[in-house]
Image (cartoon, rainbow, N blue to C red):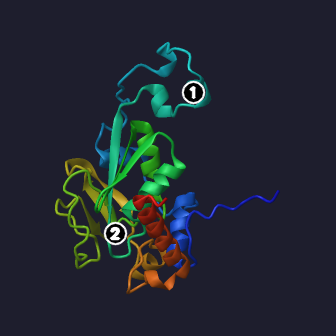
Amino acid sequence: MAEIEKQYHPGKTSVAKNRSKHMSNDLEKLREISDEDLTLILGHRSPGSDYPSTHPPLEEMGEPECSIREIVEPTEGAKAGDRIRYAQWVDSMYNAPATPYFRTYHAAINFRAVDPGTLSGRQLVEARERDMEKMTKVQLETEMTCPGLAGLRGATVHGHSLRLQEDGVMFDMLDRRRLENGTIVMDKDQQARPIDKKVDLGKPMSEDEAAKRTTIYRADNVPFRDDDEVVEWVHRIWEQRTEYGFQPK
């Protein structure tokens, strides 16, 4: 039997292909962020410190027999008893590589024991702390993120939908990051608390590169109506939701 290739997302435009690529986790790595720097900008614990726990390691718990527990392999965070922590992203409307919904799809499809949620203009993932860090590192280091057009914001996320700053960087009311000597540096954690060093997040994408890598349909780049397959797919979903709501006999 021929192996079925997963499509993930309909469409033939660059935007549709980028969406499918993100969801498949077939991502190009563009930068390197050390574990220490990641811990600093997340702000949940001090770099090098042990992961705080909410319960003993599972192997010490002496839990009762359960067939489901025997089938499902716990994540490393669950095994260790890690507490639940979060990463929260915002992405600019101006051709950022990712969008809140597609960050959620990426997390839900490719990582276990995550609790992703999408709000009006932000995306939040909660998970056991070391599992959350693993997922965040993937999104931060790869083509899913341009450090100039996306950022971790645990508080006061608003402003991402405004115009870009004069230097092309996404506006941040709490000034967590900025362009210095051609790279984006972050000197506050996602809650906007000052950290001990400037974390180098790498070079921002050029306007042309961002336009090629984005998952956002825009009238001034790749219009939604340019992809007939996606338009048909979206209308099919709308129609079926409406019909189901009316519960036709």
Instruction: Give amino acid for label 1.
Output: Ile
What label sits on residue 149 in the rendered view? 2
Q: Is residue 162 left or right of residue 6?
A: left
Give the camera-side residue of 184 and 228: 228
Q: Is residue 65 left or right of residue 50?
A: right
Q: Residues within 10 Å of mark 2 (few under 14, many from 20)?
A: many
Pointer 1 residue = 68
Give the camera-side residue of 242 and 171: 242
- Residue 222 shows in this picture: no
* Residue occupying image coordinates x 35% and y 35%: 84
Residue 81 position (above or below residue 212): above
Report x, y in % for residue 28.
55, 63
Q: Secondary structure at mark 1?
A: helix
Q: Secondary structure at mark 2?
A: loop
Q: Nearer the viewer, mark 1 or mark 2?
A: 1
Give the camera-side residue of 22 and 28: 22
Q: Is residue 193 left or right of residue 235?
A: left
* Residue occupying image coordinates x 52% and y 18%: 59
Mark 1 / mark 2, whichever is N-terminal:
1
Report x, y in % for residue 81.
42, 26
* Residue occupying image coordinates x 47% and y 39%: 113
